[in-house]
Amino acid sequence: MQNSEAVTLSAALLAVAGELTQRIHDGVVARGFEGVRPAHGFAFTRLAPDGATVTDLAVHLGVTKQAASQLVDELVRKGYAERRPHPADARARLVVLTEAGWACTRAAEEAAAEAVRAWGEVLGEGEVRELARKLLRIAPDGPIRPVW
Amino acid sequence: MQNSEAVTLSAALLAVAGELTQRIHDGVVARGFEGVRPAHGFAFTRLAPDGATVTDLAVHLGVTKQAASQLVDELVRKGYAERRPHPADARARLVVLTEAGWACTRAAEEAAAEAVRAWGEVLGEGEVRELARKLLRIAPDGPIRPVW
DNA sequence: CTCCAGTAGTCAAGTAACTTGACTATATGG
DNA sequence: CCATATAGTCAAGTTACTTGACTACTGGAG
């Protein structure tokens, strides 16, 4: 495989990723959730099951815990999350989604589905599934970071 | 296709894109180019053939022309680009890569090829080519933006 | 039990990469 | 040749981070 092919593939991948992020964001805004940034979405996916501590969130996002704490401040101020006392550790606080937070998460899922559906119209649904399988096999498990 | 599948696909795509950016960046640094950010790489791809104006660059990156101008300042200061008078418009200036800029571009191509090679070891080269074909078909042609 | 090194979180201040607003120099169509 | 549009820059403001310093709590060693 030549370098130029690798560059073409990389550019296409980053372009698709950038457009996907934009579409999800637009879709969330169109569903009436304002003041949310794409980074919040990645926080939501970590908070979603049972909540998480600020430190958990910092590791997940690959930022300092101060930055994670500031992000939680913002989510709390906007009504998407709240800080509850941690059941097993008095130092820690469990950050959980509010009902608005759950609603926003569902909106993001719908927006993602909409974007993926657009790919299905070009590639066909079977090929999209195959794309997903390939990407899952090469996806890392570490923190999800901004692309640049 | 269910929402949850779309979310899984989106997460995998963004994770792969984030890791690719990181690997290219690390590879460029490992080849001795310091003080470059991933955003510079996208600027390089626009400057590479024959140079471009600040406004061209701003459109390509999806930022204001002031931001593009600041980015060019930085590239000039670090020796990767220079401003030359524009042959056909005295208002404009043609920003072109220096030899160091070209060397950095080649380093980025090598790093990208290395990252893609790692995928080839998991998927096989044929499947990687197929992945590239699929991504190219759904890639937008607009400006390349940060993922979030 | 009682230290005490380690961890969870926050407060405060600094930094970097953008933005908006205002301006100069050149281009171009009527 | 004048009016309006465009290329670029300067200056200041914003925002999402960072580093550094601190308090409160934990949990194992002596």
Image: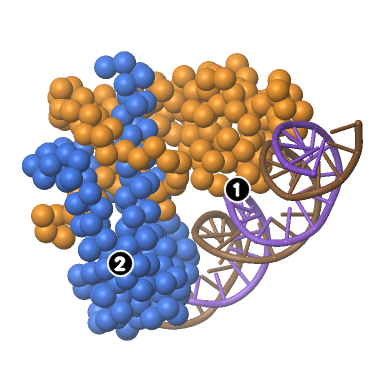
Chain colours: A orange, B blue, C brown, D purple
Residue at image location 32% in from the left, 58% down from the top:
B24
Q: Which sits in the foreground, B57 or A45?
A: A45
The percent coordinates of residue B11 (x first, y second) are 37, 33
Q: Secondary structure at mark 2?
A: helix
Label 2 sits on residue: B44
Label 1 to label 2: alpha-carbon separation: 30 Å
Is the N terminus of chain A in the top left, top right, bottom left or bottom right quadrant? bottom left
Q: Mark 1 touching mark 2, by CB under 8 A?
A: no
Horizontal arrangement in the rendering, residue B92 relative to residue A117 (left or right): right
Q: Which sits in the foreground, C13 or A62?
A: A62
Label 1 Cα neighbours within 10 Å, binned few <14 / some 14-19 / many ≥20: few
Horizontal arrangement in the rendering, residue A27 relative to residue B135 (left or right): right
**Type of the residue with mark 2:** Phe
**Type of the residue with mark 1:** Thr
Residue at image location 52% in from the left, 29% down from the top:
A46
Residue at image location 47% in from the left, 63% down from the top:
B67
Label 1 sits on residue: A64
The percent coordinates of residue B82 (x first, y second) are 35, 81
- Residue A90's mark? none
Chain hosting mark 2: B
Nearest to viewer (mark 1 / mark 2): 1
The answer to whether any part of residue A99 appears in the image is yes
The percent coordinates of residue B48 (x first, y second) are 24, 69
Q: Kindly indicate the quadrant of the structure image that contains residue D26.
A: top right
The percent coordinates of residue A83 (x first, y second) are 70, 27
Q: Kindly indicate the quadrant of the structure image that contains residue C7.
A: top right
The answer to whether any part of residue B53 appears in the image is no
Q: Secondary structure at mark 1?
A: loop
Label 2 Cα neighbours within 10 Å, binned few <14 / some 14-19 / many ≥20: many
